Amino acid sequence: MARVIAVTNQKGGVGKTTTSINVAYFLSKMGKRTLIIDFDPQGNATSGLGIDKQELGATMAEVIMRQIRLAKVVLPTEYKDLYLAPSTSHLANTEVELAQADGRFARLREALNGVIDYDYIIIDSPPSLSLLTVNGLVAADYVLLPVQAEFYALEGLGQLLESMKLIRKGLNPSLKLLGVLPTMMDSRTTLSSQVYDEIKKYFPDKIFKTTIPRNIRLAEAPSHGAPVGVYDRFSKGSRAYKALAKEIVERTSR
Ligand SMILES: Nc1ncnc2c1ncn2[C@@H]1O[C@H](COP(=O)(O)OP(=O)(O)O)[C@@H](O)[C@H]1O
Ligand SMILES: [Mg+2]
């Protein structure tokens, strides 16, 4: 059975997509068959893996509308053992269409039901606490929470943790927090280390040993349609995501 990890934080720009792509890539490099589900209408994980959104057939939008099975939209990538279920802006329409529909919170879980082809499934969530994000949380075994090392880092997290609690009480009792990941750390600034200390204070058992540095290579890689491990595998960003993937395998094997 695949381990399903939702990369979630309702703030935009904290590193969800960067984390999804690069963790998934390094998991696949470790020989784990890995599927990235792009579950953000912005489709950044799709374009970040070099896929031309204009050329796509069916996507996650049709899966969520129960028009097609997940397996039918999954694409291989250039990289062995790494697969993508793509999204485009059409995914935003489903949110409106699903508003009153039956089983609207569990459409993604339903789509994953019986999918046995992967060791890991990574869900890249949109920057909101929307129906799509809730679908991710209901479908997942684990939440990976990236937190940007900035002044307002922890603001709004209470809301997400509250949503997780509600989902645990209802639709997904086994949802766990896999870990909290400090991203865009700048070792030269005291702000970064203050934010790090603060995250550690709130999540002493959950903060990952690995932190992600601010690294220009991570920002450049998507425009080359490649994970950083391919674009510049000796960069600091690449090393960090490789270490994180190892930590994730350890944490999910317990
Ligand atoms: N560690 C990092 N160092 C430098 N730039 C980063 C880093 N992580 C993400 N970025 C850049 O910051 C922006 C937001 O990151 P992204 O992963 O798209 O966030 P989200 O998916 O949470 O909105 C992107 O332009 C991305 O390339
Ligand atoms: Mg994103």
Image (spheres, grey):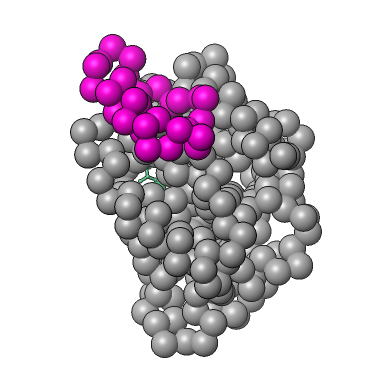
* Along the line of sight, the residue nearer the viewer: 49 or 140: 140
* Along the line of sight, the residue nearer the viewer: 217 or 117: 117
Residue 154 vertical position relative to residue 109 in the rendered view, above or below = above
- State ligand 1's quadrant: top left
Residue 212 sits inside the magenta stretch: yes
Q: Which span is picked out in magenta?
A: 185-213
Query: Residue 244 lies in what quarter of the image?
Result: top right
Query: Residue 213 lies in what quarter of the image?
Result: top left
Name the residue at 28% across, 12% down.
188
Residue 91 vertical position relative to residue 157 in the rendered view, above or below = below
Image quarter hosting the C terminus: top right
Image quarter hosting the N terminus: bottom right
What residue occupies the far top of the structure in this picture?
A: 188
> Left or right of 206: which side holds 80?
right
Residue 74 vertical position relative to residue 145 in the rendered view, above or below = below
Name the residue at 49% across, 16% down.
235
> Left or right of 25: which side holds 32?
right
Q: How many marks?
A: 0
> Left or right of 183: which side holds 167?
right
Query: Residue 247 lies in what quarter of the image?
Result: top right
- Is residue 84 visible in this depiction of the protein? no
* Along the line of sight, the residue nearer the viewer: 189 or 101: 189
Residue 215 sits inside the magenta stretch: no
Name the residue at 51% across, 35% down.
205
What residue occupies the far left of the structure in this picture?
A: 151
- Is residue 171 visible in this depiction of the protein? yes
Name the residue at 44% across, 26% down.
212
- Where is residue 176? Give x, y as percent: 56, 52
- Where is residue 21? Give x, y as percent: 53, 40
- Where is residue 153? Give x, y as percent: 28, 38
